[in-house]
Amino acid sequence: MTSPRPFAYALAWAVFASLAASNVRAELPVSWTDGLVDGERVLLLGNTFIEREQRSGYIETALTAAYPDRNITFRNLGWSGDNVYGRSRARFGNVDEGWRHLNESLDLVKPTAAIVCYGSNAAFAGEEGLDEFRAGYARLLDAVGRHTTKIMLVSPPPQEDLGRPLPNPEKQNANLAKYSAAIRDIAYDREYAFVDLFAALGEKMERGIEGKANLTSNGVHLTEYGYWEAARAITRAIGKPTPVVTLEATSLTAKVPLNAALPLPSHSVGYDGEVQDVAADMIVRYAATGGGSLDLNVDGEKLGTASADKLKSGVGVNVPKLADAAEKLRKEIVAKNELFFHRYRPQNETYLFLFRKHEQGNNAVEIPQFDPLIEAKEKTIAQLRQPVELKITLTPAK
């Protein structure tokens, strides 16, 4: 379970000795130097990691909030158990049917940018399967490339050692490291962006909590907390770290983006005892001369006290007003994702589109009726993604 953040009114402080970007920051090609642009239609493509993201929404929410002034939409085409050949999408057909279904889904989405994550399943084949994986991934990326060449490849996350009787993941993580390296090389060869999630959630992980929490529920599949950490890693990697607010005087009214403000999930199967969110929603800097300590107030409410020296470096703070706004945005995104899921994967598609459509195929006309519902959700998302105005004041400590 989560506990109240340190300091009064569920607020957390953290002093940042260094405000440098994460050491897993992506090397961005020209197509990604401005991030996601206005009017972008972003495809999320992959297997279980991507499909389950639509139910948590942490990654999409962080990316949405990172570009509040840009109209960006997301479509999640994740499919559990899938591989680069679209095998899991075959429904009642063969692998060729899965490939055809995948391409039809791409035609439906018409992406202008794509974030793709495969390799977690393929890595079970070990080094012997690398050539087949490379060839299959190249074919898949060529298919995506019919719509866009602005592609970001994300390496699969590592497996987590949760102790016995679950398997020791050491051997499989060695395989995943090889596949992550292969994905990195594919990205560089094709001039795609690359995010090393294997490293970001593994040996180079920078946790945003105090306490013990597992990233996965079974060593493989991410928990809600795992997706929260993945969102932090991806936004840092593409150059959207925690927002910094710099005060030139002791008072400032600023609009603060929400990309770092997602609160730690209130419940996660990975929590072991009390867990606290210590990842800052924003960083406050004040380059005043002199010493002493200052009280930091937001919207008239004292959040805590910091020394002038620490404020010069930057003090991280969590603000419930930001967290509440980010959580509201996330819930709206999850609701939108559910609507789109039923749009492109209706539960009764056997009767609507496949070999039993002679029975209920007339109801297929209802499926596009999800579109205006999705559009309505996206209008609300556009309103909710806006930065939140805060009045920040510094006063001599009492």
Image (cartoon, rainbow, N blue to C red):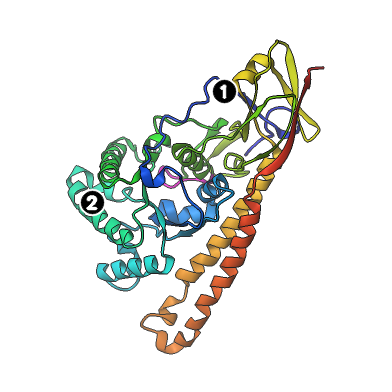
Q: Is residue 219 magenta?
A: yes
Q: In this view, does 12 lie above or below 360?
A: above
| Figure quadrant of the N terminus | top right
Q: Is 99 placed above or below 31 here? A: below
Q: Quadrant of the C terminus?
A: top right
Name the spot of residue 121 as percent of width and height, x first.
Answer: 31, 51
Q: Can residue 158 be seen in this view?
A: no
Camera-nearest label, 1 or 2: 1
Q: Name the residue under label 2.
A: 133
Front one among 318 and 26: 26
Left or right: 135 with respect to 43? left
Q: Magenta part of the protein: which range?
A: 218-224
Q: Can residue 114 be seen in this view?
A: yes
Mark 2 is on which residue type? Phe
Magenta stretch mostly in which secondary structure? loop
Dot 1: within a 10 Å radius of its alpha carbon, few (fewer than 14), some, or many (20 or more) residues? some
User: Which residue in the protein does label 1 denote?
Assistant: 16
Element marked by disc 2: helix
